[in-house]
Amino acid sequence: HASVLLVPEYKDVTLVVELEGETAEGKGVSYEKWLPRGTLLGTAGSALKVKAQLQSSDGSATKVRARHFTFQLHETSHEPGICMNFPLPAAADADFKTADLKFTPPGAKDAERQEVELPPLGDRPGYPSATTEIECLDYGAWSDLTVTCALEDGRTITGHLKNDASMIVIPLPKRTAGSHIADAWKADHGIAADTPDDDDSEKLPAGGKAPGDGFTLYEEYRGFVENDEYIEGDPTKIDFFVNNHIGADAVPGIELFADITGAAVHFRLSDSEFNPDQRVVNGNHRAGAHRVDQHGVVLYTDPRQDGAEAHFSQAGVRGRPKICIGIAVQPRGAATSVTTSENVPVTDLVFAYDRAILHELLHAVGVEHHGKGDGIAMFSFVFADDPRNKTGKPCFWFGSSSDRHITKVIDESTGRDYAEELAPAFEQSRARTREQIWNQLLANQKKFRDARESYTWEFTFGQDVLIELDNLFGHTPWYVGAEHGESSGAEDCCMRYYFADAFRKKGADNTFYFITAKRSEHIGVEVCRSSAGTGINAAGRKPQPRYGDAHAGCGDCADWIVFNDAVPPDPEPSWE
């Protein structure tokens, strides 16, 4: 509701208030350009010098005598801390409870120094005046200033801002009615003066499903501390905070994420500026515009990790910073499937670690894999003369020893039966091994059978010995990329997996292609804008697209990005 202050107006005398700003560095600035600024130590930062001068209504000297001048601050902010994340909320609540703007001594009439009473200076005859100073303790401080003068004849004169007789309640800083943000700051950032303090409408140049970064315009104006330095938010960009416990190794991946999304990523936060357990970046709020507790993301090294993995507190939904409780990343130098894949050129592997960080950060802001169904499967080479092989030619078992069946594997490059291609090398290896251990296998089999005299054997003694020899060869776990699975979709998208060994042949049961053409895929470092397969997944590729289009509801990754914790998480795609 609006309030109106009625004051008497006298024709013979007026009280003029002049304000001059001072930056935290001690440089002079006009009242119109002045911005509230604190310090990281909690001491006063920027300041305002206030002078009240009594004069005749025509600006000339007055014969009216002044008894004292009273300067008052009204509705002063008491925001916790000095900015949105510093000090952290527990300390901010304990140590930063007082007013954010205060008069400097002398003359204070209250503990919070919201009112000062001063005698006239009389620096010029007929122009009685008084001066005081207001110190600022917060980067988002606000208040309203009034000045009065008690005259010896019993009247009280209310002051007005110089050159604006209507401005008797002077907003600090200069700001539009209803706002706590300095007009000068809005102008400097190209923001319209009437933009509300709770505005959160930034959009990503990369796309995105919903606008905003979870920080209101006021919170970006009040700012943050990063790496022991005060920073403002960017009202034209998405601001995103990463608590980087990995260090320099993670920086290229984080910067790649910033480049691809267009977000302003702040990743040099110390634990005194970001609590990795709470993860709220704008926790210091009270009366300033606030929409949601916006969270940052924690990156840390886990030596047990193969690649990287984002961990979430809620299952079945797409990610948001709020529910991403941490991202575990392997050491940069670790040799894992992610960093040693034979599927991609060696020049691509240079980016494998950075891509892993990019990939998981995108999970934290709503981006899913291109599908589901990829996974490890066991393939076992079977010799043509293996007693268990009824086909009469080399082949593969597919599955575990307790649940397996013969399957066909085709060399993707040549179209030939892959088992037949491998057979000569396996047979040579088996022959060498047989020379070394055949007698031992005979002895082991005899001992085994002697202990089971009543048992009916499926194979002859010699066949079982051969089976024991054959079992020493060709058991290989292959990563199989499923159609519309994690390896599907746009080849250059960073959300696509790139380390499959094999994939199923379309329209043929129990038949797989083995990828013999090494270095034939690429590590994606982009975000796709379609679910259509490209490159090795493109329609019309021979002998077929390896993994095809992304799963229904997947791909088109750029349009799923959401940084804003005020936007509820979307359900993850249905994998049926």
Image (cartoon, rainbow, N blue to C red):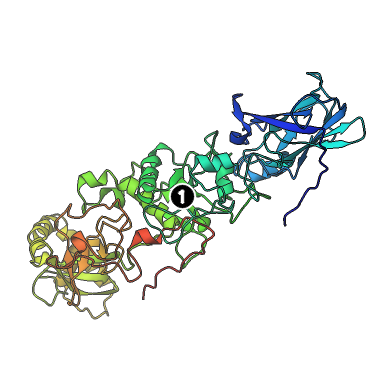
Q: Quadrant of residue 393?
A: bottom left
Q: Residue at x 48, y 38 (%)?
A: 268
Find residue 462 and report its horizontal and vertical position in percent.
14, 70
- With respect to residue 543, does 70 lie above or below? above
Q: Is residue 374 above or below residue 53?
A: below
Looking at the image, residue 369 lies above or below residue 97? below
Residue, x 24% and y 81% (percent of image)?
Answer: 456
Name the quarter where the C terminus is drawn.
bottom left
Q: Nearer the viewer, residue 340 or 348?
A: 348
In the image, 108 versus 554, the foreground residue is 108
| Residue to which mark 1 is pinned | 238
Of residue 162 and residue 241, the one placed in the foreground of this image is 162
Residue found at x 45% / y 44%: 265
Percent of width and height locating residue 112: 79, 37
Whether residue 54 is visible, yes or no, is yes
Residue 161 shown left or right of residue 203 in the figure: right
